[in-house]
Image (spheres, helix red, strand yellow):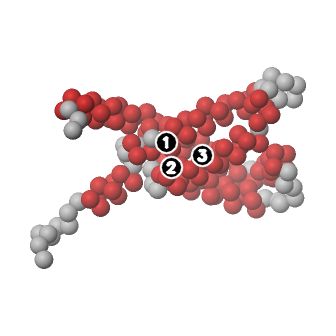
């Protein structure tokens, strides 16, 4: 059985990461939201990105609009920490795909034709990965935490007797 001081220290440790997790979640949610909004406002840019980095050409504006809407919905769910396991993973995979297609720029960021700005995606990716791995501690202003708290409360008037 853990000692009282160990239990208190563990509770303090968890409490001390709630604010950084909230800040990471809000930053990531806004990051995804901005890129999703960009896809709606400028759907043609998505076609250019699909052609240049994914080898998919000639799809028009529809994929940009659809993916932009999807990304904005996921980002809103991330912002409020709803269905964290699924939404954080989707966000991680979306950003991971961006990292994967720019791997050449990441391996040789200063090479001729590389874009050093793609390096900024790495700390974003690692922050998202950390958020995903620590998601059960991400409870501050979290709809998942509120749903779990409500589900664990006893029903009013229930005595527990048959």
Residue 162, relative to residue 114: is it above or below?
below
Q: Distance of mark 3 from mark 1, alpha carbons?
A: 11 Å
Marks 2 and 3: CB-CB under 8 Å? no
**Of tags 1 and 2, which is closer to the observer?**
1
Q: Which residue is mark 3?
A: 92
Q: Residue at x 35, y 51 (%)?
A: 145
Residue that lies at the very extreme toward the bottom in this rendered image: 162
Reading the image, the residue beneath label 2 is 78
> Regarding mark 3 in the picture, which secondary structure is present there?
helix
Instruction: Mark 1 and mark 2 in contact? Answer it, CB < 8 Å.
Output: no
Contact, CB < 8 Å: mark 3 with mark 1?
Answer: no
Q: Badge 3: few (under 14), some or many (20 or more) residues near its Cα, within 10 Å?
A: many
Residue 97 lies left or right of residue 32; in this view the side is right
The percent position of residue 141, horizontal first and vertical second, equals: 38, 46
Residue 128 is left or right of residue 84, and the answer is right
Q: Is residue 162 above or below residue 8?
A: below
Q: Is residue 1 above or below residue 61?
A: above
Residue at the (66%, 44%) spot, across then down: 96
Residue 152 place in picture, x, y as percent: 26, 59
The answer to whether residue 29 of the structure is visible from this angle is: yes
- Cα separation between marks 2 and 3: 11 Å
For label 2, the SS is helix
Which class describes the residues within 10 Å of circle 1: few (<14), some (14-19), or many (20+)? some
According to the picture, the residue beneath numbered tag 1 turns out to be: 133
């Amino acid at each position: 059985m853990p000692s009282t001081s160990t239990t208190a220290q563990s509770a303090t440790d968890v409490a001390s990461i709630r604010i950084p997790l909230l800040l990471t979640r809000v930053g990531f949610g806004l990051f995804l939201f901005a890129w999703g909004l960009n896809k709606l406002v400028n759907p043609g840019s998505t076609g250019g990105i699909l052609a240049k980095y994914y080898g998919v050409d000639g799809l028009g504006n529809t994929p940009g609009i659809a993916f932009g809407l999807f990304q904005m919905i996921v980002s809103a769910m991330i912002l409020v920490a709803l269905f964290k396991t699924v939404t954080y993973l989707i966000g991680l995979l979306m950003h991971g795909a961006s990292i994967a297609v720019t791997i050449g720029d990441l391996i040789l960021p200063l090479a001729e034709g590389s874009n050093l700005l793609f390096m900024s995606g790495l700390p974003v990716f690692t922050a998202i990965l950390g958020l995903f791995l620590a998601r059960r501690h991400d409870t501050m202003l979290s709809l998942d935490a509120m749903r779990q708290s409500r589900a664990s409360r006893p029903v009013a008037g229930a005595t527990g007797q048959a």
